[in-house]
Amino acid sequence: MERLLLLLVLGLAGASPLEDSKLCPPHSRPWQVFLHDRWTRCSGALVDKWWLVTSAACAPTSPGAMASLGEHDVTVDEGSEQHVAVAEVIRHSPYRSPLHSLAMVRLAQPARLTRHVQPIGLPGRCPGPGESCTVSGWGATLPNQNESPKHLKCLTVSVVDDQTCVKSFPDYLFWSLGMVCAGGTRTAGCLNDKSAVLECGGQLQGVQWFSLGCQNAAHPSVYTKLCKYNEWMRRVMDSHTPTTTSARPITSERP
């Protein structure tokens, strides 16, 4: 009987989602933020106690938008979370084009920095082809599948050179210098999160633009090349950080 119980316990442990090789170790990405409102659920990256970076597609539009920091399993209360209202959204213009996909999100209250909530550094360089990076977010990791957000997922991906990336583009996409690609034939590249976070060497290097790897596993996914936007991001933070903690209404677009 004891042997049977032991086998049962081991079997249940093996079936646990915590054994999923694509799950991040809990709270190993303290900069990852879960953005959610009436219309969307996706990711952002904390870069300052007031500010998140995300993609244009993930930028909140609802007055009730929230940023949940310190999350791993978004379906339960883990005791590490901070749920903060979104106060302001500043999109890079023109965002309705193939040129840019980037938004800065200001919190209504500054994040309280803990071991579970920490900002990630803006890029000090651009990523190079072949460089190993990590992409993290909430969503499906299998092509052509949907999955409700639950545990934070992590994938190791390699940066792909621009020429290889362009060759994988469908007809409706256009290349721009604000793009970087990672994943494809050499590494698993599917993480179906509208703004999955690309981290290379401890620096924020991208937010997901097009999850091409979730349509065809042989194709790399496309990220906003954040090293090209350092000046813009710093200018937004310098000019829009409040001197008080009072919330301001969401704005849909700013130059």
Image (tube, helix red, strand yellow):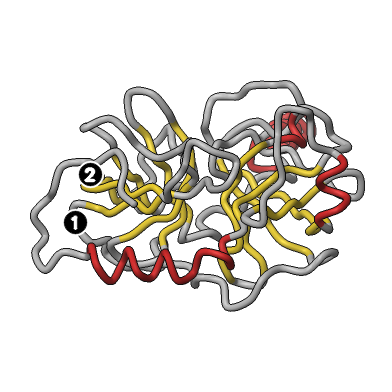
Residue 1 visible, this angle: no
Q: Identify which residue, 240 or 177, lies in the foreground.
A: 177
Crowdedness near tag 2: few (<14), some (14–19) or many (≥20) residues, C-alpha within 10 Å? some
Q: Which residue is mark 1?
A: 109
- For the N terminus, which image quadrant? top right
For the point 21% across and 47% down, the residue is: 87
Residue 71: x and y in percent read: 43, 48
Q: Nearer the viewer, residue 173 or 158?
A: 173
What element does badge 1 sit on? loop
Of the residues shown, which amino acid type is indicated by label 2?
A: Ala
List x then y, in percent, for residue 152.
56, 44
> In which quadrant of the rendered view does residue 175 lie?
top right
Q: Quadrant of residue 251?
A: top left
- Please tell me which of labels 2 and 1 falls first in the chain: 2
- Give percent across and percent down for residue 6: 74, 36
Nearest to the observer: residue 83 or residue 225: 225
Location of residue 143 in the rendering, given as x and y in whole percent from the top left corner = 77, 27
Residue 78 in view (yes/no): yes
Front residue of 4 and 145:
145
